[in-house]
Image (cartoon, helix red, strand yellow):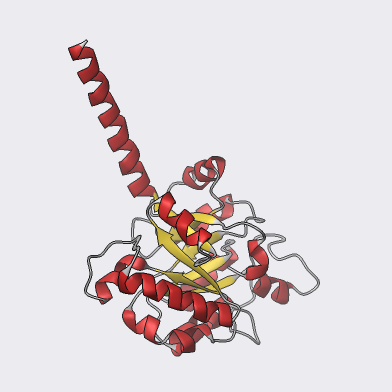
């Protein structure tokens, strides 16, 4: 996610793990800015992800995909289908960040192949230059090693953004695997990554589970955007709330 694309607000995305074309549409109707199609975890395969990307309007700058590795073959397919950002997980070195940039960017910045894609995907005088501007190379830092090597990762030419995975980061510090940390080493890592990314003109995002936590990070200026929730977790919460509401209503009726 590039700073020029951020505007005055803080974009809010969600993680999609199931191969359903309708979910991004429902999320957009609710007010979400975009989606991170998760090919690393969940049930999404490459074919389904490419189809979902083609169902999302081309002008949506926040149609992202998280891959399992910086392997250029699936990244190329996702980009040609309309992905506007590629998230590479567990980046812990400059060489891994360089591999991501190479797969996501056209020459001379990277080595992305120029081939058939969605019509008018990158409008402009130079298709390749417009494509590089439109696509964000996003390194996910989610380990203590990644934080320790943040300077070499973030300074990689062509890297646009860093995305924090707080649960895995917590585990790497010997903590429970959860997010939304208010203090401790994960919170300190967020503040440190804010300093490093700001110094290099790179944006910073993070996965959040609670809207209140995300709002606090935005207010403190610690992140530029967030992935707020996972489709299956959100569904589980809605299911639980619905059944709890039914049980409460039945209890109220039985005592009246």
Q: Is residue 70 visible?
A: no
Is 84 on the left-hand or right-hand side of 213? right
* Viewer-side residue, 51 vs 163: 163
Residue 165 lies, in percent from the top left, at 38, 68
Is 67 on the left-hand or right-hand side of 133? left
Residue 157 lies, in percent from the top left, at 58, 86
> Residue farthest to the top?
256
Residue 246 lies, in percent from the top left, at 27, 24
The residue positioned 58% from the left and 82% from the top of the image is: 200
Is 25 on the left-hand or right-hand side of 122? left
> Residue farthest to the left?
255
Residue 109 lies, in percent from the top left, at 63, 85
Residue 144 found in image quarter: bottom left
The residue positioned 61% from the left and 56% from the top of the image is: 9
The residue positioned 50% from the left and 55% from the top of the image is: 13
Residue 243 found in image quarter: top left
As drawn, 61 above or below 100: above
Which of the image's four quarters has the N terminus? Answer: bottom right
Q: How many numbered markers are drawn?
A: 0
* Viewer-side residue, 99 vs 174: 174
């Amino acid at each position: 996610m590039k700073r020029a694309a951020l505007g005055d607000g803080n974009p809010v995305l969600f993680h999609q793990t199931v191969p359903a074309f309708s979910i991004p549409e429902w999320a957009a109707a609710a007010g979400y800015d975009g989606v991170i199609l998760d090919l690393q975890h969940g049930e999404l395969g490459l074919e389904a992800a490419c189809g979902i990307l083609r169902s999302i309007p081309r002008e949506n700058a926040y149609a992202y995909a998280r891959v399992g590795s910086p392997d250029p073959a699936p990244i190329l397919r996702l980009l040609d289908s309309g992905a506007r950002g590629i998230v590479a997980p567990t980046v812990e070195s400059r060489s891994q960040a360089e591999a991501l940039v190479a797969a996501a960017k056209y020459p001379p910045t990277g080595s992305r192949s120029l081939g058939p894609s969605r019509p008018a995907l990158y409008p402009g005088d130079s298709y390749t230059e417009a494509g590089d501007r439109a696509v964000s190379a996003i390194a996910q830092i989610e380990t203590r090693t990644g934080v320790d090597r943040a300077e070499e990762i973030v300074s990689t030419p062509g890297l646009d953004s860093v995305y924090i995975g707080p649960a895995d980061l917590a585990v790497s510090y010997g903590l429970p695997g959860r997010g939304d940390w208010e203090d401790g080493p994960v919170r300190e890592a967020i503040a440190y990554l804010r300093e490093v990314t700001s110094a290099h003109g790179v944006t910073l995002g993070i996965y959040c589970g609670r809207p209140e936590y995300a709002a606090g990070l935005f207010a403190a200026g610690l992140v530029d955007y967030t992935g707020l929730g996972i489709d299956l977790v959100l569904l589980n919460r809605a299911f639980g709330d619905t059944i709890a509401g039914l049980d409460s209503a039945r209890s109220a009726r039985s005592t009246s």
